[in-house]
Image: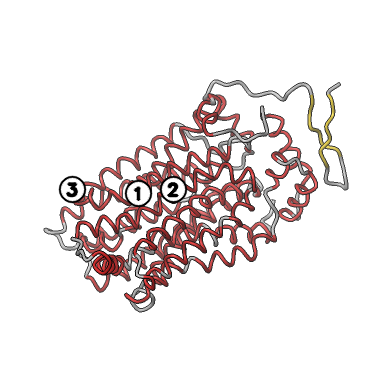
């Protein structure tokens, strides 16, 4: 099927007001780090007549960085119930209120002289990102035809890279990287969300949600007509019905039942490995502490911010490369190649930092390895784990699968954000060897376990994993079948007793 303007518009709007903010919030605290610490120092002295030491300020700043991930994990825990009750698009629209609250808290924190408004704002925007980071790929995966699912599934990862790049550009000292402007910089998340809130409600809900979970045939056909324009809508509805018949229950499984279901144990293990590996690959350490890493690599202070912006431009290009090649090369090569290259670059950072005292040119090798880690991540590992989480599970399992994946993703994100400064102090450049081992471990798991899901239906993918779990193909219930009856040329559902 062909890419329609409505599919492209929904992918852009859903990602622009959600995934872009995730990337922006990952990197936005990097450039004003010293100003935020100074603000904490000033306000604590004013309010409590106590001058905190450098160690305490480092802990407080680490909390500011990592509380975003705690909020994200909280949001991920809510995904299953929200998407079941409000739908995929409905959840995205309703969750925008969190951005307006969090962005306002951060924007007015300096005016109220309250450092905890910054921390609270980071937490609340993290809750929004925790919800949207799971819901956006779920929504796009369900509205996309199977031949475009990979392309549309990686549109959010491009926006994550654009969000990081935007934060790096706006954080330049010539723009908003000044002491008086950092609250404005943190609160800029309001504007993309406003665009999403104004335009996304005009587009339809996920057809799979409307048919399989709500049983609304007319809304399903209407949504498909909006998203497809061309193609066999009737055949696509029949494919959804086939998936519906394969479900023992159309109700969403709880997380506990998902984890106990033997038929999906390999799918669950896969999302555990790829989501933990995605965050423990070292990418968050690179994004949170880019300036500090470049400083340790010997880059002159005036050049650090421009070097950081350069890495942002490269990651956007790498994300676009992954998006436009995924339907040609498949999911597996992007994951395997991305993680192998990231592991190689992590090892390269360790070697270059150890040798830069003897060989000054090694500082440039170190910068190149940082760029390599970011490029390798954005080509595949940035977006494919979210995409395959949608592809590996049927409709009844998908919300809980995203809850599990999101919680693990954000827990790992928090761990790296909070622990990395202390890990680097304790182990120096050797800490990147830990990231190297994790990257290569995920690549090895992908080679041996994860099948290629390109251009396959959700039911076909589920049956591929069923052979690994030694579970027989599930048969439809014999008592009744939902069959397609022609209506207005598109079809509707009719309940027919089997004769």
- Measuring from the top left, give residue 435's x and y in whole percent: 30, 45
Q: Which mark is residue 342?
A: 1
Q: Toward which corner of the image does residue 317 lie, by quadrant? A: bottom left
Decide: few, some or many residues near mark 3? Use Cα within 10 Å; few <14, some 14-19, many ≥20.
few
Earlier sequence position, callout 2 versus callout 1: 1
Q: Secondary structure at mark 2?
A: loop
Q: For the residues marked 2 and 3, what is the alpha-carbon distance in whole angstroms?
A: 28 Å
Q: Is label 1 in contact with label 3 (beta carbons under 8 Å)? A: no
Q: Residue furthest left?
A: 358
Viewer-nearest residue: 33 or 4: 33
Image quadrant holding the C terminus, namely top right
In the displayed structure, 220 sits above or below 102; it is above
Q: Is label 2 in contact with label 1 (beta carbons under 8 Å)? A: yes
Q: Which residue is drawn at the image coordinates 33% and 52% (left, top)?
A: 417
- Measuring from the top left, give residue 410's x and y in whole percent: 42, 46
Earlier sequence position, callout 2 versus callout 3: 2
Q: Which residue is drawn at the image coordinates 43% and 60% (left, top)?
A: 121
> Which residue is label 2 attached to?
381
Q: For the residues marked 2 and 1, what is the alpha-carbon distance in whole angstroms?
A: 10 Å
Asked if residue 172 shows in the view, the reply is yes
Q: Secondary structure at mark 3?
A: helix
Viewer-nearest residue: 408 or 51: 51
> Which residue is label 3 attached to?
426
């Amino acid at each position: 099927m062909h890419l329609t303007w409505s599919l492209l518009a929904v992918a852009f709007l859903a990602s622009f007001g959600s995934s872009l903010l995730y990337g922006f919030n990952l990197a936005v605290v990097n450039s004003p780090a010293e100003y935020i610490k100074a603000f904490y120092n000033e306000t604590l002295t004013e309010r409590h007549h106590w001058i905190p030491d450098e160690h305490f300020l480092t802990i407080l700043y680490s909390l500011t960085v990592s509380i975003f991930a705690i909020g994200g994990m909280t949001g991920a825990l809510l995904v299953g119930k929200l998407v079941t009750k409000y739908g995929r698009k409905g959840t995205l629209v309703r969750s925008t209120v969190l951005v307006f609250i969090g962005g306002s808290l951060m924007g007015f924190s300096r005016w109220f002289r309250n450092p905890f408004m910054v921390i609270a704002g980071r937490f609340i925007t993290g809750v929004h990102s925790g919800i949207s980071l799971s819901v956006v790929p779920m929504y796009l995966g369900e509205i996309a035809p199977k031949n475009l699912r990979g392309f549309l599934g990686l549109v959010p990862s491009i926006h994550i890279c654009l969000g990081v790049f935007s934060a790096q550009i706006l954080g330049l000292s010539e723009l908003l990287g000044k002491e008086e402007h950092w609250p404005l910089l943190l609160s800029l998340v309001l504007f993309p969300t406003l665009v999403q809130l104004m335009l996304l409600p005009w587009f339809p809900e996920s057809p799979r949600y409307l048919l399989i979970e709500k049983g609304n045939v007319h809304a399903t056909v209407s949504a498909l007509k909006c998203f497809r324009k061309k193609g066999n809508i009737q055949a696509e509805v029949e494919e959804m019905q086939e998936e519906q018949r394969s479900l023992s229950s159309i109700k969403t499984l709880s997380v506990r039942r998902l984890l106990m279901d033997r038929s999906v144990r390999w799918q669950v293990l896969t999302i555990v490995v790829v989501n933990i590996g995605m965050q423990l690959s070292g990418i968050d350490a690179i994004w949170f502490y880019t300036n500090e890493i470049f400083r340790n690599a010997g880059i002159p202070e005036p050049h650090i911010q421009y070097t950081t912006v350069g890495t942002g431009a490269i990651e956007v290009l790498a994300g676009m490369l992954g998006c436009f090649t995924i339907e040609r090369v498949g999911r597996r090569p992007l994951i395997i190649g991305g993680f192998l290259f990231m592991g190689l670059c992590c090892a390269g950072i360790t070697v270059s930092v150890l040798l830069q005292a003897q060989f000054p040119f090694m500082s440039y090798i170190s910068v190149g390895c940082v760029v390599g880690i970011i490029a390798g991540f954005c080509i595949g590992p940035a977006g494919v784990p979210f995409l395959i989480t949608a592809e590996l599970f049927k409709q009844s399992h998908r919300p809980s699968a995203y809850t599990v994946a999101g919680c693990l993703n954000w827990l790992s994100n928090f761990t790296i954000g909070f622990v990395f400064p202390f890990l680097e102090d304790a182990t120096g450049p050797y800490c990147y060897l830990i990231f190297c081992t994790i990257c290569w471990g995920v690549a090895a798991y992908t080679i041996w376990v994860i099948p290629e899901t390109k251009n396959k239906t959700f039911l076909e993918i589920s049956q591929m994993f069923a052979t690994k779990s030694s579970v027989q193909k599930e048969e439809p219930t014999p008592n009744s079948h939902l069959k397609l009856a022609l209506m207005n040329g598109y079809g509707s559902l009719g309940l027919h007793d089997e004769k």
